[in-house]
Image: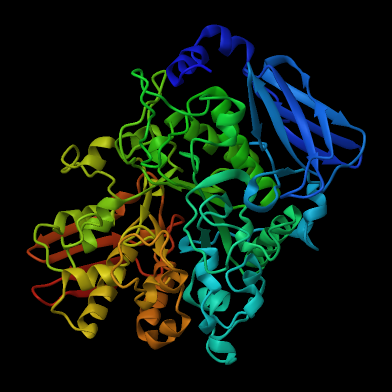
Amino acid sequence: MKTALEWKKYYSSPEFREHYIYDNDDLGVSCTDSGTSFKLWSPSADSVTLNLYHEGDGGAAYAHIPMKKEDQGVWSRLFDENLHGVYYDYSLMFGEENVRSADPYAYACGVNGRRSMAVDLKMTDPEGWENDRAPEKGTEQIIYELHVKEFSWDPSGGFPEQYRGKYKAFTCPDTTLYGDGIHPTGMRYMKDLGITHVQIMPAYDYGSVNEAGKDTEFNWGYDPVNYNVPEGSYSTDPAHGEVRIREMKEMIQVLHSQGFRVIMDVVYNHTYSLDSWFQRTAPWYFYRVFDDGRISNGSACGNDVASEREMCAKYILESVLYWTEEYHIDGFRFDLMGLMDVDLMNRIRKALDERYGRGEKLLFGEPWAAAETAMERGAIPALKKNIALLDENIGMFCDDTRDAVKGSALKIKRPGFINGAAGKEMDIVRSARAWCASEEDSGRDEEAAAGVRAPSQIITYVSAHDNQTLWDKLAETMPEADAAERMRLNRMAAALYMTCQGTLFLLSGEEFARTKNGLEDSFNAPIALNRLDWKQAWENRSLVECYKGLIALRTMLPGLCDKSARASERICNELTADGLVSFEVDNRSADGSERWSRLRTRRGGERQYEQKVDLR
């Protein structure tokens, strides 16, 4: 076999790009009453054999069927019958080497994703699925980050025991604290809080949890194996590939019926390992390699996906569209979006807009990378410094606002404005206008220099699954403060970022002082640490009510909800002093109507840590 660098040179050649870029959108398996089609892109294979199985794990193949070589690197096989429920994989010959691989284009799989499954997708639709619709967007988007297992694991949530940690828990919309019938948990609680969008942490098939193992196994799931298949550990039956599909659709269907739009957390920047279906079917095509032969590792996960290559970009774009069409997903959060290229992100935005309407589907991500990546052909990474090159409806998490409010997420001892850091006042003002430049500070800060085009490009937040929770950060930076003082600072942090322009985002449980006992990175910590403690949501009800009130207030303030390019002009009469920030917001609606024409906000105050809002 060639080396990684030799493969790179081959894939970059004009000959390869002329003859092996496949244009159609029918790779994978199409399974209908009229027949079943198998198509695999493997341009360098000398032969491909389709292996068919009765089960998704174990047992020998009952058939070995040679695939036909087509143009543009595609191998195909057509059957007259509907093979729904049949499992399969491929045997590929590269010279003398025989490689066994599942299908990277699969829509269904067996336990742990080692075998793919032919699926007639209409047979996985829950009752009424054809009538499923997302709720109206409303005046503002409030995004709530949830992990499927964390959401319902704790007994305090009142979910049926057999559904805890599963997709099916979301089909129980009327849960209460320990089933007491009085104190709402789950979806009733989120609706009361004012959440509009639920962001589901990775729910595609990932490799860091054994689907046939114990239910106590836990991982965040940033380890993709099968990009177009739901994760099996969240299903009630991971051994049968159609079950996870139906149950994920049921989850989305009920979330929609309860008034929530659904955002999917996607990780197209790396795979669980280099020994992936990508690598087994098209060696080194889907991965970046430096010109000296080093494997690119900007993800810090051992591999970087080559989004700038034609067939890789095609795969990612089609995968996003598949989730919107088949699962009715309403938006996407891109993990390490800084490893994706600007051109592809803009293509995805354009494709979503053409199909569903301008800005109808949310699209945003992390505008950073862990290290340098080996992009080719002059591709430009979708990093924070390149925000001006992205469509104005592609958002980025704003770590500048996060760090200005509470202190650095990476330097856990370093405070921010609310916990006593000096010199943060102008950063708070810039946060208020979503880092869109005013004339006096243009060129003085990174975001202004980069050219934030509109508040629609900024995700305003102070906590997410990464790093410490807000409560744990306050405990770390204010060890002398008692619980009451930390509660006050927590309320101030919420008031600060919820009176900023941009799109609001919060980690589930931030509003009830969620803690992970100070752990900075809980990606594989026990579920007992990561789970949502619904009892705490009622013990800290006064903090929850503060968040609820701030969310409700924000929806009545057009000056803060405005995402247009000139929204920052609404921020005026800014004043700063040590520990004090004040400004006014033009609060008139676009049609000139007004409820309160002027919003005056005063933040901080010497040793008082106050937040005051006057509505005029």
- Can residue 10 be seen here? The reply is yes
Q: Residue at x 12, y 67 (%)?
A: 420
In the depicted view, which residue is nearer to us: 294 or 346?
A: 294
- Can residue 43 be seen here? The reply is no
Q: Please provide percent x and percent y for residue 320.
A: 59, 42
Quarter of the image where one finds residue 414: bottom left
Q: Is residue 54 left or right of residue 171?
A: right
Quarter of the image where one finds residue 606: bottom left
Quarter of the image where one finds residue 555: bottom left
Q: Is residue 608 left or right of residue 139?
A: left
Q: In the orientation shown, which residue stands out farthest toward the top? A: 15
Q: Please provide percent x and percent y for residue 199.
A: 51, 59
Q: Please provide percent x and percent y for residue 26.
A: 73, 31
Q: Residue at x 44, y 55 (%)?
A: 590
In the depicted view, which residue is nearer to us: 465 or 212?
A: 212
Number of marks in the image? Answer: 0
Q: Residue at x 37, y 44 (%)?
A: 565
In the depicted view, which residue is nearer to us: 348 or 535?
A: 535
Q: Is residue 526 left or right of residue 515?
A: right
Q: Is residue 180 left or right of residue 523?
A: right
Q: Is residue 179 above or below residue 575?
A: below
Q: Residue at x 35, y 71 (%)?
A: 516
In the depicted view, which residue is nearer to us: 404 or 79?
A: 79
Q: Please provide percent x and percent y for residue 121.
A: 78, 48
